[in-house]
Image: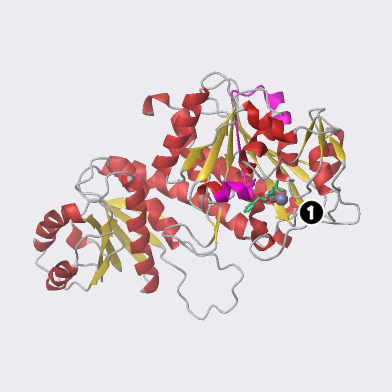
């Protein structure tokens, strides 16, 4: 979608639909300013409009250049202000979609004091709310291709609004990259095909990519990744993405790691199909979020040296598949007793995390659809954040939580107390790959902690990365969860003044 910013008089805005967000608290002020337009249609719509969240009242103006206008409500709860803007913009986008609107404008409410962040949130909500994944649909009976152009109208600070709108567009497009990858049919994103998609992305946005094939992965002795891959017909890949600008503020890189299980059947510990295996094309949502975030980092030109690692394979019960009881020697040299082949994510992440050490990283952040227990604990809209107890661990988590609040990709902390580690002691190897049912997300985190020797943040995104029905600007299917979180976190990280 093309996004631009304008300050021209509302009356002059020549679009198919003008979206006007407003909360209950500011309805009177809005009414006063819209009445000045002396338009019958708009005035009548105002009579029906209260400003409540979720509300949308369409008007057909006679005195404006705009063909239509829609008043959309904004939740006036002061907590989570930007999220409410995203929601209202998504409401506007859905009306635009229903009415097959090609060009739209969105008015930044003048009562908001942060024009930059407000414009960013509105553009994110509108662009993400307009997203539809229809690559595979053949019955394109309608010629409507979705809203093509969005004009952001700012009456106060157009410079700030332009900055925010540009950033919002780039962030939303990065989220869409992740959504598209998750929604792609599993047979079109085998590890080799996924790596090719990463190479194309790197070429397009100017970061470097190198892809290891199976032989190189064997040379590196990535025993965890190779064990999971044993049941598969398709070889694994290990992709390394790097953004290293001359003006980087960090001398040691930040390393991102994304779980790239392109399909998780559970392996021999096979998953039941219904409500379990059927959404497992999304088991590479961590990888997708990391790829989207790298695009965003490059496009926003962040002054930060960032490396991203993506171990990719599917997990299948093939003839040679790894079995419960197998003891695997990992990349780090540690041994793991496999007691459930469905706990495969931690096997491949462990190798990527121990390889991350070779970069002498300042910080490593992994994203993974790791445990069903995270969905039980936090639901479908919030991810889990965990960290090891090295210097500054409390602020590390606090900053991630704050980035979640601001970006809308919310996360909540879970502890990594050592006591939990007892659950993954093995009778035959250094550790085993499953604990008991208790605290499943935490024991998975404790497992990964065995493979890190640097400051580390683990994000379990099993819940929010994939939805069975749309929720506001979060589309059905892949949501791209984690992209906005990482971009907000890394942008603040590279500019501590902005904290
Ligand atoms: N990919 C799953 C986790 C998952 C579950 C993601 C639901 C998204 C939605 C992971 O590989 C898995 O199967 N985890 C097991 C671990 C268990 C065997 C210790 C789980 O959570 O059941
Ligand atoms: Zn699994
Ligand atoms: Zn999995």
Q: Whole-percent x and y of residue 378?
A: 51, 47
Most foreground residue, 229 or 294: 229
Does 211 lie within the magenta span? no
Q: Residue at horizontal 50%, vertical 27%?
A: 396
**Front position in the image: 308 or 418:** 418
Mark 1 and ligand 1: say if the CB distance to the nearest ligand atom is below 8 Å: yes
**Above or below 253: residue 468:** below
Name the residue nearer the viewer: 88 or 219.
Answer: 88
Residue 293 appears in the figure: yes
- How far across and down, in percent of the image, does residue 295 sit? 55, 43
Please indicate, yes or no, whether residue 213 appears anywhere in the rendered image: no
Q: What stretch is highlighted in magenta?
A: 352-376
Q: How is the image coloured?
A: secondary structure
**In the image, 256: left or right of 232?**
left
Give the x, y percent position of residue 465: 56, 52
Tell me which residue sits at (9%, 58%) in the image.
32
Residue bearing the label numbered 1 = 269
Q: Does the magenta stretch include residue 368?
A: yes
Which quadrant is home to the N terminus?
bottom left
- The image quadrant that residue 74 belongs to is bottom left
Looking at the rendering, which quadrant does residue 188 occupy?
bottom right
């Amino acid at each position: 979608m093309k996004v631009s910013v304008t300050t021209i008089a509302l009356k002059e805005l020549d679009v198919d639909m003008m979206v006007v967000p407003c909360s209950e608290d500011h309805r009177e002020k809005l009414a006063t300013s819209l009445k000045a337009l002396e338009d019958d249609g708009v005035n009548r719509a105002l009579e029906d409009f209260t400003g409540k969240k979720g509300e949308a009242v369409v008007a057909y103006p006679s005195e404006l250049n705009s063909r239509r206008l829609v008043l959309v409500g904004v939740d006036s709860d002061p907590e989570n202000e930007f999220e409410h803007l995203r929601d209202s913009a998504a409401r506007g986008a859905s009306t635009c979609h229903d009415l097959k609107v090609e060009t739209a404008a969105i008015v930044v409410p003048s009562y908001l004091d942060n024009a930059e962040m407000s414009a960013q949130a509105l553009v994110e909500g509108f662009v993400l709310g307009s997203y539809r994944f229809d690559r595979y649909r053949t019955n394109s009976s309608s010629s409507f291709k979705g809203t093509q152009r969005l004009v952001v109208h700012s009456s106060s600070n157009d410079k700030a609004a332009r900055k925010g709108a540009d950033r919002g567009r780039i962030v939303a497009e990065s989220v869409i990259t992740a959504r598209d990858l998750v929604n792609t049919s599993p047979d079109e994103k085998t590890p080799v095909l996924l790596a090719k998609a990463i190479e194309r992305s790197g070429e397009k946005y100017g970061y470097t990519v190198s892809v290891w094939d199976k032989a190189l992965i064997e040379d590196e002795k990535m025993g965890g990744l190779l064990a999971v891959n044993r049941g598969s017909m398709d070889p694994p890949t290990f992709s390394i993405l790097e953004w290293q600008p001359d003006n980087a503020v960090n001398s040691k890189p930040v390393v991102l790691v994304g779980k790239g299980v392109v399909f998780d059947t559970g392996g021999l510990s096979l998953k039941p199909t219904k409500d379990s295996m059927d959404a497992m094309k999304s088991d590479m949502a961590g990888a997708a979020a990391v790829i989207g975030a790298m695009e965003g980092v490059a496009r926003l030109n962040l002054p930060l040296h960032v490396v991203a690692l993506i171990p990719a394979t599917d997990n299948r019960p093939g003839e040679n598949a790894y079995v419960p009881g197998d003891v695997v020697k990992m990349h780090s040299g540690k041994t793991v007793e496999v007691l459930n082949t469905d706990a495969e994510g931690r096997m491949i992440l462990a190798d990527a995390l121990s390889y991350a050490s070779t970069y002498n990283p300042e910080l490593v952040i992994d994203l993974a659809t790791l445990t069903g227990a995270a969905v039980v604990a936090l639901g479908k809209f919030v991810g889990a954040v965990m960290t090891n107890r090295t210097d500054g661990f409390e602020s590390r988590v606090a900053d991630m939580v704050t980035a979640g609040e601001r970006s809308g990709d919310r996360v909540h902390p879970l502890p990594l107390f050592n006591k939990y580690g007892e659950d993954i002691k093995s009778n035959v190897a250094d550790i085993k790959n499953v604990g008991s049912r208790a605290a499943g997300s935490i024991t998975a985190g404790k497992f990964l902690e065995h493979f890190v020797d640097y400051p580390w943040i683990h994000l379990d995104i099993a819940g929010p990365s994939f939805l069975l029905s749309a929720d506001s600007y979060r589309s059905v299917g892949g949501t791209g969860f984690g992209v906005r979180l990482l971009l907000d976190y890394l942008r603040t990280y590279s500019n501590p003044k902005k904290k």
